[in-house]
Amino acid sequence: MTDAGLTGDATGAVLVLNSGSSSLKYQLVHPDSGEVVASGLVERIGSETAAAEHEQNGDTRRFDGPIADHHEALAKALDLFAEAGTDLASSGLQAVGHRVVHGGQEFSEPVLVSDEVIETIDALSGLAPLHNPVNLMGITAIRALLPDVPGVCVFDTAFFHHLPAAAATYAIDRDVAAEHHIRRYGFHGTSHEYVSGAAAEFLGADPTDLQQIILHLGNGASASAVRGGRPIDTSMGLTPLEGLVMGTRSGDIDPAIVMYLRRVSDMDIDDIDHMLNSGSGLKGLCGENDFRTITSMVADGDEAAQLAYDVYIHRLRRYIGAYMVDLGRVDAIVFTAGVGENAPTVRRDALAGLERYGIAVDDEANVVRSRAARRISTADSEVAVLVVPTNEELAIARKAAAVVAGA
């Protein structure tokens, strides 16, 4: 893949949008070559101090000032494209690809944007109240601004839609679960699918022959067990809160903690929800969720940071062990996303002492920094340990292009 900021023709490209509650990330990508024509970020949407930054043709353009909403944010992004010499409305875009967090049981594949699809995504907002509504803001805004360009929704949950029933089912009253659509959905699916395929390509293997553990470790973190190119388990559940310790999310807890806090504290359900999603995880344990800062704090002897790190690694190792049992045979363990790609201590400590299981990390290879896929296991390690950079934008662009081509 070529780096953002390089000159490129927009004809046939896909505009990939990732709408957050107060931010908008975008990238203009050629799905075949992976060339990034332009990329940008709009931050602090809804405030007087919003900022937009756009990279194209080796040039960075900025806007600082009020941006009221996502429609205005996208209009500003289109203005920055025009200033850089690209009128997206007449540039020959083949599609706009949208990251949508929750597809529920309704969406197992990418779909063209339509009124019915928008209504269904909105109806699923109860399952992802922090994500689906803002994803919809981006969808409706760009639909108004570029009405002639087809939009495609790509769902975080789609890769895990067909999990085995034993993995997808919670042991609660089955009628309650059915009525309220409660099951394990899984998230970061676009990344897990892309990385598992890229790992197979790196190893020169057919994905259907491989059994992999994929560790997507960023501010949000998830693990999956992938057999023959299809997931058989994943750590996130009904929502992205379950599973690994994350930057601000607790991951797995005793569910009775929620009821206990409701009874003994002055916290209501919304307070507890906010704490578990935004004030827990690494931030809740040591006050920081940036792994670089935490690593520095640990080096300085900060006890809270050390405990946060130890809890993080403990949970990660628990999932690795569980998925080794689930798979029976592991061919590759793959680290990806911000922490997974850039924190060698995490990779080292997550797999420490597993030599008897055929897993051995090469200390020298592990500390090498690179943007390329690479092997960090020793030559005699039976299990390949890899670092594979994720590229969700390219994955979304390719899925969007495929949907439009087949429409």
Image: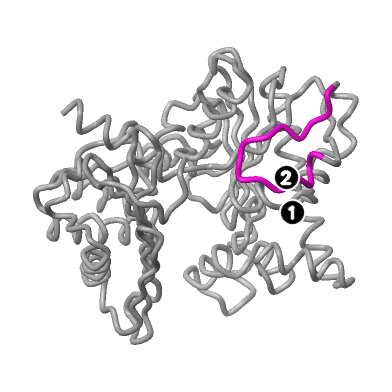
Q: Which residue is mark 2?
A: 316
Q: Residue at x 52, y 69 (%)?
A: 274
Q: Residue 81: which quarter of the image?
A: bottom left
Tag 2: amino acid: Leu
Q: Which residue is mark 1?
A: 312
Q: Amino acid at mark 1?
A: Tyr
In the rendered image, residue 362, in percent from the top left (x then y), is placed at 84, 35
| Picture residue at 43% right of the left edge, 53% below the top | 4
Q: Main secondary structure of the magenta part?
A: loop
Asked if the residue under mark 2 is in contact with the one under mark 1, i.e. CB atoms within 8 Å, the reply is yes
Answer whether residue 377 is magenta in the image: yes
- Counting from the top left corner in percent of width and height, residue 8 is at 32, 48
Horizontal side of residue 341 vs 402, given as left or right = right
Q: Residues within 10 Å of mark 1 (few under 14, many from 20)?
A: many
Picture quarter containing residue 330? top right
Q: Residue furthest left?
A: 148
Q: The C terminus appears in which quarter of the rendering? A: top left
Task: Write the residue at 75% across / 45% down.
Answer: 368
Which of the two residues, 43 or 232, is positioned nearer the viewer here? Answer: 43
Q: Is residue 160 magenta?
A: no
Tell me the residue at 19%/55% (across/down).
88
Magenta region, residue range: 365-379
- Above or below residue 86? Residue 166 is above
Q: Dot 2, crowdedness within 10 Å: few (<14), some or many (≥20)?
A: many
Going by the image, does 48 lie left or right of 366? left
| Number of numbered discs | 2
Q: Nearer the viewer, residue 94 or 72?
A: 94
